[in-house]
Image (cartoon, coloured by chain):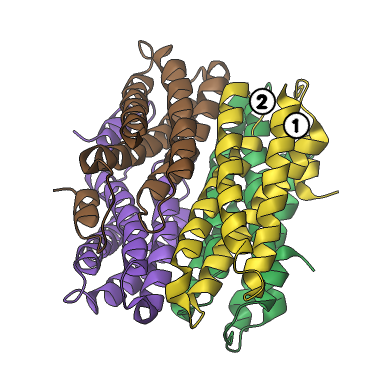
Chain colours: A brown, B yellow, C purple, D green
Amino acid sequence: MSAAAQMLETYPQDLGGIDREKLVACIEACLECAQACTACADACLAEDMVADLRTCIRTNLDCADVCEATGRVLSRHTGYDANLTRAVLEACAAACKACGDECSGHAEMHEHCRVCAESCRRCEQACRELISSLG
Amino acid sequence: MSAAAQMLETYPQDLGGIDREKLVACIEACLECAQACTACADACLAEDMVADLRTCIRTNLDCADVCEATGRVLSRHTGYDANLTRAVLEACAAACKACGDECSGHAEMHEHCRVCAESCRRCEQACRELISSLG
Amino acid sequence: MSAAAQMLETYPQDLGGIDREKLVACIEACLECAQACTACADACLAEDMVADLRTCIRTNLDCADVCEATGRVLSRHTGYDANLTRAVLEACAAACKACGDECSGHAEMHEHCRVCAESCRRCEQACRELISSLG
Amino acid sequence: MSAAAQMLETYPQDLGGIDREKLVACIEACLECAQACTACADACLAEDMVADLRTCIRTNLDCADVCEATGRVLSRHTGYDANLTRAVLEACAAACKACGDECSGHAEMHEHCRVCAESCRRCEQACRELISSLG
């Protein structure tokens, strides 16, 4: 079991009706995507054609910031607020969609964009599934 | 002129049609609110009645994270994406609304909640004004 | 291979003499520890005896912030600066030591503190091993 | 009085022997510097000569992350740990020194680097003064 799953298991109060599996999957996807985006921005910066990767770098940086904040919000269960959780997940899905689209456009040329795009797709999907499960 | 305003002034490309005054106001409100929320969570933790302030602390922590991510997204202009900006601002307004409401409920008893609630109100307002100006 | 390992593999320039295995291990330990600490702060907040866990919550929050910043710095390789990397790793090891010690003191009573302490120990160890390998 | 100063004033417990003026100055310098560095990375990205600004962008991003984490740690007073505070301040001073040096080298050519370098110098100085005052 991952540390994130263990932390959820050991939360001392009731978690309400939230789907634990989808929640853990989304937390882990946010962490992975934030790191991939931070690394992809840096890898783009190191490319000879960095001038053509400006939008990619910017979208990577935004996505990293939003995924990180989302992973934090989802790691808290005390005083849970479904409206706030939903708004944050919507922003995260939007950031992952934008970054996944952008990186996909460079995936054949840059392996780091291919790996990053996959992390963005997984995270966008995990956010949307968690949003749906919130009811 | 604040450093945030100076940084905006010195951006080397066109900023598009964005309202500079509202943008700077929103960046500064995000920074201030993130710090106030971080400090308010800590001040609540130091209160004798900390057990009654659980929801306040949690909402403070969420609001700090979302404001910080929003301040970063708004500080970037290269490869601007209005949809992503709007989604992030909506999440930030939601976080500030939740935290402003929560802190307001303790404002008479705790001065730090009063100061923090004011920062949240300002930031929520700044987000909403910037959203409106995005058209 | 983890996404963090894949991102390192696909970095388009030379990584210098850095120990790739220790670097990936440290990045992953930082991500895991940041999440565990964020969740442990929240779980402590939900305990009946929250008033006795103030220091634990505070140390958790600091450790989460420092681990997150460290994971980001380590995910960048362009324009590498060994002095900065070392200073950040030292701060991270100090934060993980403080939080691991604090959580260990509650590990028998609170499972979340036990899991979190293990993440802190792993991350502290990973930071120290990476520092040593920097030469 | 700034919000950061007000939040410090309203902290409900004793702050120990810490120098309040230096603490507030350092918190505010961290916030300002983090924002300036985030914006400077983006402004560098928008320059025609972005390929020559790779190291500057990377150092900006690191400095933003470390300043943000430092600003958060300094905003907490509950369960204060002087060793951790000192280690974080040392890392922050190192990040500000690196970024201030790098941006200074481009200050005549890029106004955003000039403004950012000034924020880095102020923040490095504020960190060092606070370290000294910790005794």
Q: Which residue is mark 1?
A: B11
Residue shown at 66% from the left, 82% from the top: D19
Question: How far from the left and from the top, in percent, is residue D9?
Answer: 69, 77
Question: How far from the left and from the top, in percent, is residue C55?
Answer: 40, 77
Question: How far from the left and from the top, in percent, is residue C11?
Answer: 36, 29
Question: How far from the left and from the top, in percent, is residue D69?
Answer: 51, 58
Question: Residue D46 bears which disc, if any?
Answer: 2
Say above or below: A45 vs B128.
Answer: above
Q: Tags 2 and 1 in contact by the CB under 8 Å rule?
A: yes
Q: How dense is the environment of label 2, judged by Cα within 10 Å: few (below 14), some, or many (20 and up)?
A: many
Chain name for mark 2: D
Instruction: Say left or right for A127 vs B73.
Output: left
Instruction: Say left or right for D95 vs C9.
Output: right
The amino acid type found where label 1 is placed reads Tyr
Name the image quarter holding the C terminus of chain C. Answer: bottom left
For the question of whether residue D3 can be seen, the reply is yes
Of B56 and D48, nearer the camera is B56
